[in-house]
Amino acid sequence: MSKIKPFVKWAGGKTQLIKKLDEYFPKFEGTYYEPFLGGGAVFFHLQPEKAVLSDTNAELINLFQVIQKKPEALMSRLDEHQLKVQDKEYFLDVRAWDLSKLDDIEQAARTIYLNKTCFNGLYRVNSKGQFNVPFGKTPQGNPPKLYLKENIEACSQALKNAEIICEDFSETVNKTKPEDFVYLDPPYHAPNKASMYSKVAYSDDLQDRVAQFYHDLAKTGAKVMLNNSATLEILKDSHTSIKNLYENKNYTVKVLDSKWSIGAIGDWRGKRAELMIINY
């Protein structure tokens, strides 16, 4: 099994936490489900034979589908973007492109280009769903590399048999069976607008919905692992603890140290407490 890295940075990505999580991943013979796909770090680490990968972010899902089916065409377009990775005016022009007028390859190449050249690798959109992260300056002579050919090819191979779909996470509960494994990495509780990486509201209501989803998944007999933030001291008028949503159930609840490398607020980057909940 070759080592693969996610081809984009994504808020809440689990690359830094994989070694700790690896101690708890279960053995399973069925299908792997990841309904909050993000950068796909856990999928690329496990590289399961059968997988259903989903997210409500259509731009992200398109990127995964293009990596899966058209990696060569994507890399060819990225080579053109590579020539302008330190050109702020070009960045602003690409950022303003209308996604509805781009084909799947152009959309995917734009997604990677913006992800690699914007400030701190953020993915954030405004209320109209438009990408609005500023240009990320880099030292002259040290331009960001948009992709590594070997990694794109390895990612494409790993995704070969995966079903990649754009849908709400709630759909997953209708598909899982006792022999399956479901990994959940939902948007963390962060109601401050500075942490909005999508149009999804990082609210109490969302956390309640995710918790109920977890309970429903557990009833199907599937093995389920969930990660969420256990650090809530910066929040006001919210759940006193995400842990409360999963207590009094037959789950194993652990708090792990993690490191967040993406965040619009500097104080939010660095070590954080990471909640892990498993039902097996």
Image (cartoon, helix red, strand yellow):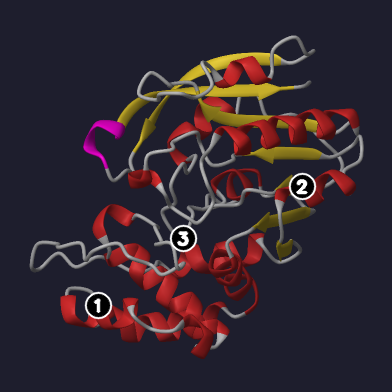
Of residues 1 and 66, the one nearer the viewer is 66
Q: Is residue 225 above or below residue 230?
A: below
- In this view, the residue in front, 73 or 208, is 208
Residue where numbered disc 1 is placed: 92
Q: Are marks 2 and 1 in contact (CB under 8 Å)?
A: no
Q: Mark 1 packing: few (<14 Cα in 10 Å), some, or many (20+)?
A: some
Q: CA distance from mark 3 to mark 2?
A: 26 Å
Point out the residue furthest to the left here: 140
Task: Categorize mark 3 by other alpha carbons within 10 Å: few (<14), some (14-19), many (20+).
Answer: many
Q: Nearer the viewer, residue 207 or 175?
A: 207
- Residue positioned most to the front: 237
Query: What residue is at 17 percent from the left and 75 percent from the top?
Result: 88
Determine the secondary structure under disc 3: loop
Question: What amino acid type should be assigned to the residue bearing mark 3?
Answer: Phe
> What type of secondary structure mainly makes up the magenta span?
helix
Region in magenta: 265-269
Whether residues under marks 1 and 3 lie with C-beta atoms below 8 angstroms apart, the answer is: no
Instruction: Pinpoint residue 254: horizontal percent, then vertical percent.
Output: 58, 14
Is residue 267 highlighted in magenta? yes
Identify the mark nearer the N-term, 3 or 2: 3
The kind of residue tagged 2 is Ser
Front tag of 3 and 2: 2
Q: Locate residue 75 relative to residue 81 in the image: left or right.
A: right
Sequence-earlier tag: 1 or 3: 3
**Magenta-span inclusion, residue 23:** no
Q: Residue at x 8, y 68 (%)?
A: 140
* SS type, badge 1: helix
Q: Which residue is mark 2?
A: 170
Query: Which x, y percent locates residue 113?
Result: 35, 72
